């Protein structure tokens, strides 16, 4: 008797969550496409290809940020199985490794380069990361011409929540203008460095004229869709395929919510038993 009640309650909760969360489109977050042992942000090309092959064979469509914006604001229809692929920081291997695979599987993706680190060594992450370079201006143009998107990841990649007002304004508004001049197109979407933002940051991002901003799932409240705090799901180097399939499924937000609760629970446990 008790067991059937519990099963019923869990099932009812899942149904409520499904109805609540079904409008979320899975947004995947990648960094490097490279084989770098021990670096969770570097996904080997073979694994990336395995994921793209799964998406292609199972009827997924990679959409653009513009399509996502039109879906959330004008209720424009999206393909039934949509996914948005994003790349942070604009690494050179996105151009050499990811682009040919994206083209092979007829997918599109958006890259978020850091304006002052275009075509340079990755020295903004001088904390034991393997040395590499980022895409050059010309490569960003070729990336665009290949049907991919480029959007903004600030000027210098700071923690925006820790910036003084003047610096925050520059990182957000000046980077937008610089990218627009460089690529001769409007830039309308921002990606928060490290996924960090707060109310002050969002106000500045809105003021600068952006239409949406991308964060990481664990800093984002999931109950309502906030266009300036879109939750993205990291795809780490050790990603198992079953987990990847969950991350792009229609119940992915339930999966994310459970991960958040798991983390909150662990934090609480540490607090109580420390
Ligand atoms: Zn970044």
Image: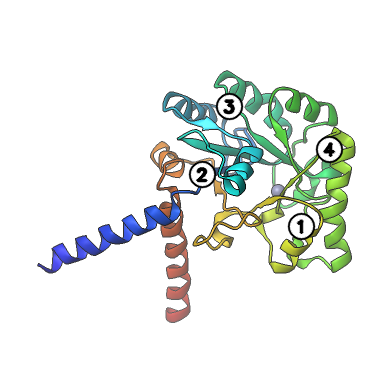
Q: Which mark is residue 107?
A: 3
Q: Secondary structure at mark 2?
A: loop
Residue named by callout 4: 120
Q: Who's the residue at 76% across and 57% down the image? A: 205
Q: As displayed, is residue 158 above or below residue 119?
A: below
Q: CA distance from mark 2 to mark 4?
A: 31 Å
Return the disc, 3 or 4, that comes first in the chain's sequence: 3
200 to the left or right of 254: right
Q: Nearer the viewer, mark 1 or mark 3?
A: 1
Q: Which mark is residue 205?
A: 1
Return the disc, 4 or 1, that comes first in the chain's sequence: 4
Return the disc, 1 or 3, that comes first in the chain's sequence: 3
Are the residues tagged 2 and 4 within 8 Å (C-beta)?
no
Q: Nearer the viewer, mark 3 or mark 4?
A: 3
Q: CA distance from mark 3 to mark 4?
A: 27 Å
Q: Which mark is residue 26?
A: 2
Q: Secondary structure at mark 3?
A: loop
């Amino acid at each position: 008797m008790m067991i059937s009640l519990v099963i019923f309650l869990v099932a009812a909760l899942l149904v409520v969550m499904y109805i609540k969360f079904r409008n979320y489109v899975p947004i995947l977050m990648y960094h490097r496409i490279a084989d770098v042992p021990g670096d969770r942000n570097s996904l080997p090309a073979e694994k990336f290809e395995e994921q793209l092959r799964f998406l292609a064979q199972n009827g997924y469509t990679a959409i653009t940020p513009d399509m996502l914006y039109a879906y959330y604001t004008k209720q424009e229809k999206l393909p039934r199985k949509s996914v948005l692929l994003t790349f942070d920081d604009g690494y050179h291997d996105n151009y050499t490794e990811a682009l040919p695979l994206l083209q092979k599987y007829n997918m599109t993706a958006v890259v978020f380069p850091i304006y002052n680190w275009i075509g340079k060594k990755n020295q903004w992450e001088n904390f034991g990361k393997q040395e590499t370079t980022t895409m050059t201006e010309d490569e960003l143009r070729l990336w665009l011409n290949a049907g991919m998107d480029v959007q903004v990841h600030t000027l210098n990649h700071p923690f925006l929540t820790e910036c003084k007002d003047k610096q925050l304004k520059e990182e957000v508004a000046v980077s937008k203008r610089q990218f627009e001049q460089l690529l001769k197109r409007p830039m309308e979407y921002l990606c928060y460095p490290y996924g960090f933002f707060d109310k002050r940051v969002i106000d500045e991002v809105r003021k600068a004229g952006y239409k949406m901003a991308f964060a990481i799932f664990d800093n984002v409240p999931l109950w309502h869709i906030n266009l300036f705090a879109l939750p993205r799901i990291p795809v780490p180097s050790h990603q198992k395929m079953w987990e990847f399939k969950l991350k792009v499924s229609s119940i992915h937000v339930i999966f994310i919510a459970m991960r958040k609760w798991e983390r909150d629970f662990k934090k609480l446990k540490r607090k109580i038993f420390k």
